[in-house]
Image (tube, grey):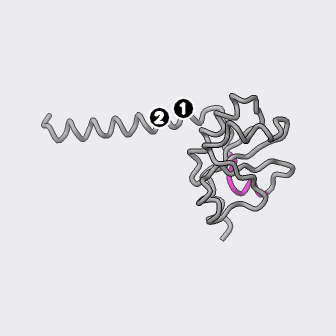
Amino acid sequence: MDTASIVLLSLFGIYMLIKFLGFLGRLGIKQVPPSVLDQMKGITLLDTRTDKEYKQGHIPGAIHIPLSDIGTRAKKLRKDKEMVVYCQNGNRSIWAIKRLMGMGFTKLHNLKGGYGAWKRSHR
């Protein structure tokens, strides 16, 4: 096998490992598609994007707590309510959900595809 093939196979292997680890990070976290979110009643909707992203547009009724502030500001949220957490694409919200789980929140869902998917479905 020549050097270029080895490099390509190595890069592909690294890519697959990263994708697999991302998949593992989502295990156990329910993914809610935007169409289902629109039908959910009585939930808390948590936007974990940056201030700049939030100001550029957000889902009506969302509470804004940037990912960096979850540990301190989420203490004011009710742990007994269902919560759908979202970011721009659905990745950072997984980290927010993991932090919330560590704080005792149990009724957590991730908005599949994040705000971008929600916005595309509401054009």
Crowding near the residue tagged with mark 2, few <14, some 14–19, many ≥20 C-alpha atoms within 10 Å:
few
Residue 99 % position (x, y): 65, 34
| 110 relative to 115, above or below | above
58 within the magenta span: no
Residue 84 % position (x, y): 73, 46
Q: How far apart are marks 2 and 1 (CA)?
A: 6 Å
Q: How many labels does the image show?
A: 2
**Element assignment for label 1:** helix
Residue 56 % position (x, y): 62, 66
Residue placed at 75% from the left, 55% from the top? 62
| 40 relative to 57, above or below | above
Numbered range of the magenta stretch = 32-38
**Element assignment for label 2:** helix
The one nearer the camera, 16 or 115, is 115
Seen from this angle, which residue lies furthest front? 72
Crowding near the residue tagged with mark 1, few <14, some 14–19, many ≥20 C-alpha atoms within 10 Å:
few
| 58 relative to 8, above or below | below
